Amino acid sequence: MNVMREEDIVTGGSMSVEEATDRAARLMDQYGHLQGVSLIEPMVHEEFNGRITMTSSFGTEAAALLALVAEVDRDLPVIFLDTRKLFGETHTYREKLVDHLGLTNIKIMRPDEEKLEAEDPNGMLFASDVAKCCYLRKVEPLQRALEGYDAWLTGRKRFHGGERDALPVIEPAGSRIKINPLAGYKREDIEDIFEHRALPRHPLEAEGFLSIGCMPCTERVDPNTTDVRAGRWAGQDKTECGIHYII
């Protein structure tokens, strides 16, 4: 279970919380039966034209959503959180995927250097307060990156389990709306996207990493495990970094 702190929550869209909640309900009624490109297209070009972005970790499954988005709009802003603790292979993979898919608008967000110097001067905060480390390196930068947007696309899926078991396709997130085009996809559906579109794989996947985040908090797992995210914060009472608590 993750503890959500007051400072981990932010509003910031142009809608009020009530307006976002009502609009999400209306969108679910109209589009809730859709997924993949069929859902992305109206969200990007009709409902939130110019006011929608997406986030991507450029991890093992990230290419699936990126490929579908590229089919709809290669110029859609893609937010990438460079925590300064990522594997070098993730940066290399990002560059490869961007080139492969022809993406044109990658927004690389980094932690605030002054805050890092004050709160994590030796870069070891992850060892004593992992939640605070995630906040400084991921949550706060994403708060800044989302300014000016009313909606954002995520690659979350129900089969990842945990808090994602009942993930809706469209959900209110405070004063914004969150779209989850792959919510209902199965593991084999993601594999089909990779195979049919000849997408490159994250180089660390072959080394036993099924879900890839920051280097200190990511471990190899048994490739036969049903828990795709088992290698994230292994042994800790934590399953999410906190960015999906941003509302």
Image (cartoon, rainbow, N blue to C red):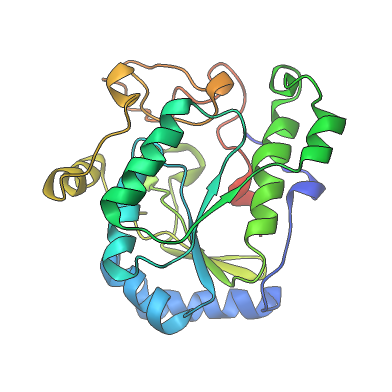
Q: Give coordinates of residue 196: x percent, y percent.
A: 12, 49
- Taking the view exactly as shown, the residue that stands out farthest to the right is 118
Q: Position of residue 137 (x, y in %)?
A: 68, 38
Q: Is residue 3 visible?
A: no
Image height check: is 29 above or below 98?
A: below
Q: Can residue 180 be seen here?
A: yes
**Point 46% across, 48% down: residue:** 56
For the point 40% across and 37% down, which residue is it? 59
As drawn, 165 above or below 35: above
Q: Residue at x 67, y 66 (%)?
A: 147
Where residue 236 sits: x, y (%)? Answer: 61, 20
Towards the viewer: 123 or 235: 123
Q: Point out residue 44 in the picture as x, y percentages from the top left corner.
A: 41, 74
As rendered, which of 238 and 129 lies closer to the eye? 129
Residue positioned 65% across, 36% down in the render: 2
Q: Residue furthest bottom?
A: 46
Q: Where's the C terminus, which quadrant?
A: bottom right
Say whether residue 65 is left or right of residue 76. left
